[in-house]
Amino acid sequence: MSGGKVDIKVVLLGKAYAGKTSLVERFIHNRFVGDTVPYQNVITIGAAFGAKTVTIDNKNVIIGIWDTAGSERYEAMSRIYYRGARAAIVCYDLTDKSSFDRARFWIGELQKHEENCQIYLCGTKYDLVEAEPALRKIDERETRALAIDVRGEVYETSSKTGKDIERIFRKIATDYLATKKEPMTEENPDLVRLRKASKSKKLCAGCKS
Amino acid sequence: MAAEVREAEQIGNTSDSDSVQTELLETNEIPGKSENALLVATDSFEDLNYAGLTNGTLPTVSTSGTIHSLVKKKARRASALLDENEAAGDNTASSDETTNAVDQESSEVSGEDSQEDHLESRLTDLSLNETESLPEEIPMTQLIPTSSDIEDVNSLEWKQQRRHIFIISESGKPVYSRHGSEDKLVTIMGVMQALVICTHDFQKDTLRSIVAGDHKFVFMCRDHLTFIGITRGRESTQQMLLQLTYMYNQVISVLTLSTLTRIFKQHRNYDLRRPLSGAEKFFDNLLNLMDVEPGLLLSSVRCLPLDSSVRENISHSIVQHAKVKDLVFALIIAQNQLVTLVRMKKYYIHPMDLHLIINLINASESFKAAESWTPICLPKFDACGFLQAHVSYLDEECHTCLLLLSVDIEAFYILSECKAKIKERLVRYNALKAINDSLRRNSYSIQQCSISDLRHFLYKSRSIAQYTSPELEAPYHTKEEQQRLFDLYHYLHDRIHTSGRQLKILFHVGPYETLLGWVTQGFELYAVFGPLVTKTIAIHAVNKLLRWIKKEEDRLFILSSVTF
């Protein structure tokens, strides 16, 4: 599924109740709906799509986000959501060990089917861990090691406080702009002109003589 | 005409039935009749019978369903994603995925095997000892071994529930329970499955229902699953069976029949709660819906009352802006009521499928946050494949929901554009406002019919599979009274439809109200009057009511069906 009027397609993957929808809600609408029952409010059905524009160095980048459902039965469908995605935010709940195993599964899937997809690891519900360090079930060193493995980045976010959420999407947009520039820097306009000029001169000289 | 009243039944009333015969309305004036229906007008209630349901043999799962024929002409990748069976052959990458998942399953299942066998044998023993005492007073507590005091069965709250619904796999594994957690109900579920299996294996018979005290147990086995409904309400066996059929349809809607059969073919012991996780609330919500929404009992749908010009405008907006290849159905639903439905020529939607769609919208908060793209299987349309649904709310308050159902799995962005255009047009022509106004008015009051002593009614036009009923007003404004009214309708419906003896008219005098049920080829009418109404008055009133509905039919029903 590609197309639409977005610059970057970002997909959120992870176990059910890892907090993917909350993360998107915070980023797009800057709100947190799980005030009464934190992080357990709604379960996503299928996948939800949302878009937001981010401005980096005066350039507007429209980020289209696919918030997928974590339930297992959608697994077979999930490929249509991450096909052609530039970036994947793989979420795991910092207070739930099994969610990290699920994250590894998604990384495996992405590496198998979407080589060009940049992976951003995201440990969610940081506010819970901050308030009660004993709740942390996932070691930061472990996640860093995995991030290095996949040549990705790792973030620890909280949709409740908004910690690092803006940062993760700004980083995605910056990385996107950087890759877009890369092909241009390879064929440096100055360098080409110099060569052409010298060649044509030689030719001209050869013709004359 | 005389034939229609011949079978009329009287209960506790002495008025002469001959004198009212001539008063009955001519049937050619059926309100809400239309040749051009948009829903499938089948009576699923009467279609229900045990012969078809409890048969142990499985229906052959073929991939040549409606969806398959729709996508056949399309690129293979789309069909591969729609039909997982095909995906294995078509696409090597996805077959890897499947084997992965299967590996995980098998390792987990083998770990549980021994425990499972042990449990099963224990349960079988238990049930064998206890079967003799079954017809006695509520056997649940007696069946439970004393050691398991943590089980939900022992809690008073659990026991006092009016209705229980269970889904159990063939091997006795719990799949779903309406009340309490399945983990804590393993024993009782195992007992029930044992009863089913014992009857099947030893008696070579099928267990249909058990009556124990004021409880009624109804069993239905379909596709490796056993559905059990237990009630102490007024629902008849047939009506319970209808509820169980809805539950079965909901399972299919989440998984598809092909996936369900494949899972149990590979692993008899498979824990179906895994693929169903996150879908529990669909089951809960569907059962709650059955308690308040008569449409499920009548297998018909309620339409939002709207001026026909407004409704026409809405459907034309959809036709105009959603002329997209592979779009099968487009519909707008507002608070469980159908606003409009546009369909592909040749394809109809079954009321039971529409109820599943309404349930999907009703049960999920997640659609309110953003545009969604989700697979849904409509069992009556095609039990073996998924349609893709683009779901979005058109207004800020999230009352009016637009659904675009397509067979093209890649169509999200196209449909998203369609949605924006439709919304823009509906706003421009004030159609959204009209919908909201109608919602705020809450249907209509019984007083608008200006028939004294008529308290409430349900009117279903059979040809279009739609029904109408006024708001619930005093005396039916409390929860208890509403429940009682529903019980009365269940009773009336059951008395008329009970197989073996179909009635045309039933007049019933109860302690608090008088009921009149009237079923013809064209319609079904269930009316509730005050307690002192005589049969003659009731018949007069009903005729007047039919004339009123006829007058209002353009507003209350969707009489013409719009196609792409």
Image (spheres, coloured by chain):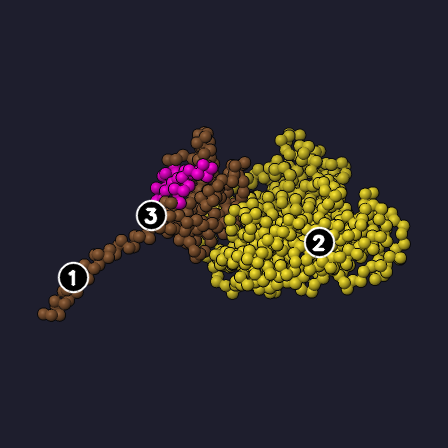
Picture layout, residue B345 above or below residue B184: below
Specify the chain shown as brown: A
Q: Is residue A163 magenta?
A: yes
* Circle 1 Cα neighbour tier, 10 Å, few/some/many (<14 / 14–19 / ≥20): few
Image quadrant in which the C terminus of chain A is located: bottom left
**Residue that extends furthest to the bottom in the rendered view of this protein:** A208
The residue labelled by disc 2 is B468
How many numbered discs sit on the rendered protein? 3
Picture layout, residue B397 above or below residue B382: above
The residue shown at (21%, 56%) is: A191
* Circle 2 Cα neighbour tier, 10 Å, few/some/many (<14 / 14–19 / ≥20): many
The residue shown at (46%, 42%) is: A30
Picture layout, residue B62 above or below residue B112: below
The answer to whether B104 appears left or right of B500 in the picture is left
Alpha carbon distance from label 3 to label 1: 37 Å
The residue labelled by disc 1 is A198
Three-letter residue code for mark 1: Ser
Chain identifier of the residue bearing label 2 in the image: B
Three-letter residue code for mark 2: Thr
What residue range appears in magenta? A142-169
The residue labelled by disc 3 is A57
The residue shown at (68%, 46%) is: B292
- Chain B: drawing colour: yellow
